Amino acid sequence: MAGVDIGGTKISAGLVTGDGTLERIVTVPTPAAEGPAAVLAAAAGAVRGLDHDVLAVGIGSAGVIDPVGGLVRSATDALPGWAGTDLRGGLRDHLGVPVAVDNDVHAHALGEAWTGAAAGRRTVLLVAVGTGVGGSLLVDGRVHHGARAAAGHVGHIAATPAAGLPCTCGGTGHVEAVSSGPALLTAYLRRGGTPGTGHLSRVAAAAGAGDELAAEVLADGARALGQVIGGLANVLDPDVVLIGGGVSRCGDAWWHPLLEAVEGELLPPLRGLPVHPGALGPAAAVIGAARLGWAVAA
């Protein structure tokens, strides 16, 4: 079975066995600027690069994905023209096998629930913090998509520290504007951080080395997100909360204030709710996408 993770900068295809073991992975750049047809062709090429016949393919893609109709309902400028793409039909035409599709964060959650840190858990809330802030809720192993396939947009919950700040969705005041990777890097530079710092990993390294400003910036973003996650937990009452994405690798300067903020928001019955990193890292979405593929191949 092949699982494919389509993002704005790279596409990863993996060969995944029936028990969720990732046997091989192929990663290629996403030709986003060349348009949807080029992206579909690149995804199909990555699957062919696995050099193995597959029964079906599961796709986890950036954007609001309709898992029933197979279409991309909306997407950001990271994938120009992606909205309206027939994701399932296009890949099926390229590869000639059944194709299942869903959002990449939902695929991430499915992977962790299958063989990762949420295996055996009935209700799982995943929050992925990277270029944006996404989320997924699983109940009994099934994704909650919502009435319009748009469930999971954790980054677009209002947060006081983001008041007045523009968000990528066109609104203002959403937690993504202060807690995403780009937002943290921008805040560090705006507040007097080392000029020319071009990646959040350098901010995290500086915080780990004792840079007070770097630590303050990470903590501010983490607290804002932690309050949102705690509020969501009060509404959803999950068995476990998993945190993934590149920002989650920023170390203790980020994790400690995040966990404190989550715990500070929780209602008494939820105190001590497990909140921890995923176990599968970047492979989670590929493995979860393959799970979708196994479902349509059965």
Image: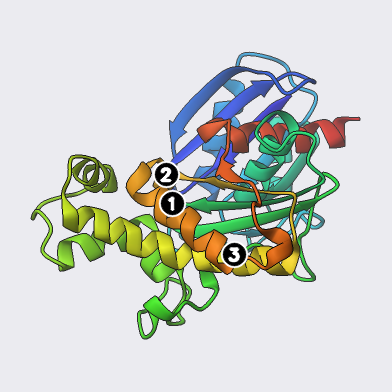
Instruction: Give me the residue at 86% from left, 47% from top.
Output: 140
- Total numbered badges shown on the rendered structure: 3
Residue placed under numbered mark 1 in the picture: 130
Determine if residue 168 is in view.
yes
Residue 34 image position (x, y, % from top left): 42, 49
Residue placed under numbered mark 3 in the picture: 230
Q: CA distance from mark 1 to mark 2?
A: 5 Å
> As shown in the figure, which amino acid type bears the numbered disc 3?
Gly
Label whose residue precedes the other's in the sequence (3 or 2): 3
Q: Nearer the viewer, mark 3 or mark 1?
A: 3
- Left or right, 103 with respect to 219, comes to right
Q: Is residue 246 above or below residue 15?
A: below
Circles 1, 2 touching at the beta carbon (< 8 Å): yes
> As shown in the figure, which amino acid type bears the numbered disc 2?
Gly
Q: Quadrant of the N terminus?
A: top right
> As shown in the figure, which amino acid type bears the numbered disc 1?
Gly
Determine if residue 75 is in view.
no
Instruction: Please tell me whether mark 1 sits on a helix, a strand or a loop.
Output: loop
Q: Quadrant of the C terminus?
A: top right
Residue placed under numbered mark 2 in the picture: 246
Instruction: Give me the residue at 76% from left, 51% from top.
Output: 138
Instruction: Please tell me whether mark 3 sits on a helix, a strand or a loop.
Output: helix
Label whose residue precedes the other's in the sequence (3 or 1): 1
